[in-house]
Amino acid sequence: MGVSIISLVALAIAGLAFYKVVIYPCFISPLAKIPNAHWSVPVSPGWMLWKRFRMQNNRTIQAAHERLGPIVRLGPSEISVNCVDGGIKTVSMFTMIGTKSHSVRKRMLSNIYSKSTLQTSPHLRVVSNAVIYDRLLPILHDAASSEQSIDVHDLNQGLTMDFVSCYLFGLQNGTNHLQDHEFRKHWLHMYLCRKPFEFYHQETPQLIDWMECIGLRLIPKYCDTANDMLDAWALDLCGKAAQSLNSTDPTVEPIVYKQLKQSLDKQAAKEGGPKPDPAEQQNDIACEMYDQLTAGFETSAVGLTYLLWELSKNPDLQSKLHEELMTLDPPIGIPKSAELPPAKAVDALPLLEAIVTETLRLHAPIPGIQPRVTPSPSCSLGGYDNIPANTRVNAQAYSLHRNPEVFPEPETWRPSRWLKEENSTVDLEEQKRWFWAFGSGGRMCVGSNLALQETKLVVAAIYSNFRTTIVNDDGIEAIDAYTVGPRAEQLILKFHPL
Ligand code: HEM
């Protein structure tokens, strides 16, 4: 009698577990109506985790959308959308953890990164003149005169770090990675050595802790050393900026650092609490600055590398671009005969704009998933209703940018698709709606205007003065990751003076 009651209870528990783990997610959950990227996804996240571990996320999701349409299920509680209406337009409004403080912080910085501020900023003007005329063009000119080739991917990573750090902290306090090749190499090594372990931080953060509990390290010690070095580096930059707070000289004033510090002081005063501890506040600012530096340098460098690669394969387009650049007044010449032309004039060049946009479409530096979480109690996406709260929803530029109905022959790099006058059939507005290189909504890239202004200026400076040809592009294909880059981490070009 006793045994049969125990058996019945065990059977009921097993039945309930089977219902919860198999029957409900496979047949009853509203997610069950969404096509499965793999047969196992309703019951396990294992298949997608494995793909991510093997660095196949972007291509796997893209293949699923090509096969199954604009919304696919990737796990028991994970889906991916690949459409604008009922897709990214809705998802952009979904939240992530810590949203309130995040949006307050973002508001503190939005003005300093607006297009009009950047185009008229005396600080960015000083930085641009120094980086282009004193650092970049002499390096390219020397290499061209001695017929030496250049690893432009390495160079771009120095160039973009200099741009962003000098804007954040002032020209005097920012980096000089372009000219300090040794330190650039060391810094990049420290930064990049942690990349292979990003998977664990993003997808299985608990595993890192569990392993540590049993005395095993999932993340090697050298990553801790690199993190310590990078933290100290960011703190050092902030320390220098703190010394320059009272300056109004545009070569010295740390404009972004100062804006954040003053806004935090003001917020603390408004809240009426005790004055923030200076060391704690400095650490907080250093974290924010570090995020901006790293978010800003790598992405812009990757975009530039692919742009130079595509143009180097297109000598005719280089000539057309050169012609367009010769309309700038004053032109960007070597040796320097005048200040750089106004940023607004560079921004208004249509072919340059089309080349930059098309590069960010086909070679989006962040093509990978931007996960959000569905709100309570439920929502509708891609024509499916009642999607439960706390479902992870991903969208990725990699797939949005490859919709052949919006971007015919999506794998072809064709800037003319952004030029209405050359292509009367093109629906520019629709293409812009699907362009997601900078994301959208509350988490949209804060530095998109800075990235576009600096990229256009660098490309304008290069093709006003040089022709480029490929020496070695082996391994130029992008890795499959959240932030991409050439598999070989290099692109060797030759610069020919015009
Ligand atoms: C071509 C260059 C760039 C690309 C393609 C790019 C792209 C992106 C993308 C896709 C996101 C995530 C958006 C989302 O989650 O929806 C992002 C976030 C961010 N980007 Fe950029 N970015 C670039 C340059 C920059 C620059 C120059 C800065 C310098 C300040 C910057 C700072 C940031 C920051 C701070 C975030 C986090 C924003 C947040 O969490 O609210 N980015 N970027």
Image: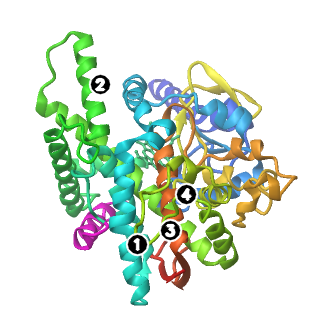
**In the rendered image, the vertical position of residue 2 relative to residue 433, given as above or below:** above
**In the rendered image, the vertical position of residue 182 relative to residue 96, given as above or below:** below
First along the sequence among labels 1 and 3: 3
Mark 1 — residue? 335
Mark 4 — residue? 329
Q: CA distance from mark 3 to mark 2?
A: 36 Å
The image quadrant of residue 183 is bottom left
x, y percent for residue 243: 13, 41
Residue drawn at the location 37% of the way across and 43% of the way down:
122
Q: Secondary structure at mark 2?
A: helix
First along the sequence among labels 4 and 3: 3
First along the sequence among labels 3 and 2: 2
Q: Secondary structure at mark 3?
A: helix
Q: Confirm or reject: label 3 Cβ below 8 Å from ligand 1.
A: no
The residue under label 2 is which amino acid type? Ser
Mark 2 — residue? 263
The image quadrant of residue 408 is bottom right
Q: Is residue 470 left or right of residue 25?
A: left
The image quadrant of residue 78 is top right
